[in-house]
Image (cartoon, rainbow, N blue to C red):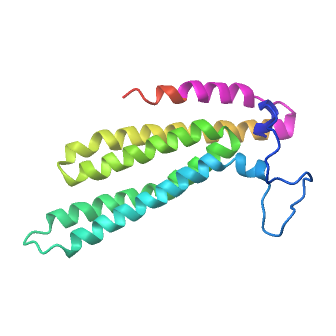
Amino acid sequence: MNDIYRLPHPPHPRASRSTKHSEPGSMDIEILDNVIFLGTVTLLSALQNVFFAYTVQNESLQKRPTHSAFDRVKIASHNCAEVYPTFLALLWTAGLFCSQAPAAFAGLLYLVVRHKYFVGYLGENSQSLPGFFFGKRLMAFLFFMATAGIINYATNYFFGINFLYYIQTATKASAALLLIP
């Protein structure tokens, strides 16, 4: 679907000339080109979850008379884990049905903001609020991208009307606006 408005790629050196899979278990390079950024952001988010879990483990092993530091780390990790499935669903839906690059950009920003929220939560509660609000804005952007892409797919399927070019132009332009605090 995204290939309608994209210039053709030169053949990849490892890609076979036929459209069928040349080896068992191999994927078409073109398919991987359409999801490489989304896969990268997903992998980085998994590494971030490992970091959060390591931080919780490290804090739990500290012998302290008060449990407030451990409780803060545990709650921050839990709060991030609650939203993680929603983030992945929005990231992949927006990237597949709308446009990969703006979705991946918003996903990377979300990872930075989620880290800021996690670290801010370890301090005062007011330090975590900017990351929380900015994260909500990024999730809303991914939601609107995904919704627009799915609606476009449905109108194209049922009525033959395709607005993908205009939706992609709008999302690419508005992705830069996400940097404004």
**Where residue 138 sits in the image (x, y, percent)?**
47, 39
Highlighted magenta segment, given as a residue range: 156-174
Query: Taking 20 as reference, is 130 left or right?
Result: left
**Where residue 85 sits in the image (x, y, percent)?**
51, 58
The answer to which quarter of the image holds residue 74 is bottom left
Which residue appears at 84% of the width and 66% of the height?
23
Which residue appears at 20% of the width and 48% of the height?
125
Q: Is residue 165 above or below residue 93?
A: above
Extreme residue toward the left, this view: 65
Which quarter of the rendering shows the C terminus? Answer: top left
**Where residue 134 sits in the image (x, y, percent)?**
38, 38
Asked if residue 166 is among those painted magenta in the image, a careful observer would answer yes
**Where residue 62 sits in the image (x, y, percent)?**
17, 72
Residue placed most toward the observer, 62 or 148: 62
Magenta stretch prevailing secondary structure? helix
Which residue appears at 79% of the width and 49% of the height?
13
Which residue appears at 64% of the width and 49% of the height?
36
Query: Taking 53 as reference, is 3 left or right?
Result: right
Query: Taking 140 as reference, is 170 left or right?
Result: right
Extreme residue toward the right, this view: 18
